[in-house]
Amino acid sequence: MAKELKTMELSNSEEMYKMRLVLLGPPGAGKGTQAKRIAGKYQIPHVSTGDILRENLSAGTGLGLKAKTYMDKGELVPDNVLIDIIKERLSKPDCSSGFLLDGYPRTISQAEALNQILADTQLDMVLNITVPDEELLKRLSGRRMCKCGASYHTEFNPPKIMNVCDVCGSTLYQRDDDKEEAIKNRLKVYAKQTQPLIDYYSNLSMLKTVDGTESIDKIFAEITSILDTYE
Ligand code: AP5
Ligand code: MG
Ligand code: ZN
């Protein structure tokens, strides 16, 4: 990226600036799937607020237990909780040279809080992955997760052995919010509370839209071509 120029001014002890990205898209659009690949290729931390909340839940923290009551119904966890989480996470040293946000911001007030947290720096790009609702429903109801973080789909991205993780051999499970009723509510909540961010970032000329109905490999190729030509 053009930002590499900045490395000339940095001493060896300072890390090269990479990029600050947001992945936007409805539940099941493939944010997590693409984020893992982007983070690997560009060596930036993948910050998923959904994963942070689920980690808190499995660790049995107060935050996790509170969040679960919202997540299981497919509702958003309150803004103030998420803003605190993201402020804390972005203050860690690994985010100083860039990051990839997945699942944050999800409301206009979360986006405004992010601007404040970034202070005199700003986002480089918001990648919006679009997929129609019927397809999202199929993707989410067939999704299977592993405790190591790997994610599969019974039909579209199956593991080599049914229900067993290719990476670590553990048994796969279904997310509690991947039940039909919760999925339908997540799609409604997305349309009402998160979709306004498309116009918000478009008005700031930060938005790039990616067709999320292609294969996982094709979408990744499209994203890398966008990122590689970004100046
Ligand atoms: P979160 O974990 O962020 O869930 P989400 O936004 O609903 O999105 P998903 O993780 O379900 O989908 P994804 O886009 O990552 O798709 P994936 O790659 O897995 O949030 C969960 C909850 O936490 C929220 O409902 C809320 O309660 C709370 N929360 C989190 N952040 C919050 C915030 N900022 N504010 C308030 N509350 C917050 O792919 C889906 C499936 O499709 C997989 O099976 C995958 O294998 C498959 N797939 C992926 N790509 C393709 C493809 N191209 N073709 C075919 N199949 C594909
Ligand atoms: Mg996800
Ligand atoms: Zn695994």
Image (spheres, rainbow, N blue to C red):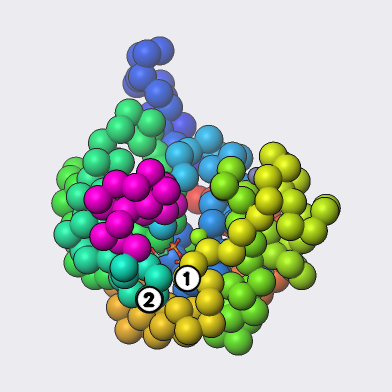
Q: Is mark 1 within 8 Å of ligand 1?
A: yes
Q: Quadrant of residue 203?
A: bottom left
> Quick check: 167 above or below 224?
above
Residue depicted at 74% across the width and 57% down the height: 163
Check if residue 158 falls in the magenta segment: no
Disc 2 packing (10 Å; few <14; some 14–19; many ≥20):
some
Disc number for residue 73: 2
**Whole-percent x, y for residue 107 in the image:** 27, 70
**Distance from Cα at disc 1 to Cα at disc 2:** 7 Å
**Whole-percent x, y for residue 112 in the image:** 19, 61
| Magenta range | 51-68
Q: Is mark 2 within 8 Å of ligand 1?
A: no
Question: In the displayed structure, does residue 156 sit left or right of residue 74?
Answer: right
Residue depicted at 69% across the width and 39% down the height: 168
> Quick check: 164 above or below 93?
below
- Depth order, front residue of 17/218: 218
**Whole-percent x, y for residue 39 in the image:** 54, 43
Check if residue 52 falls in the magenta segment: yes
Magenta span: predominant SS is helix
Question: Along the polypeptide, which appears first: circle 1 or circle 2?
Answer: 2
Q: Quadrant of residue 5?
A: top left
Residue 125 visible, this orientation: no
What element does badge 2 sit on? loop
Check disc 2 and give the amino acid type.
Lys
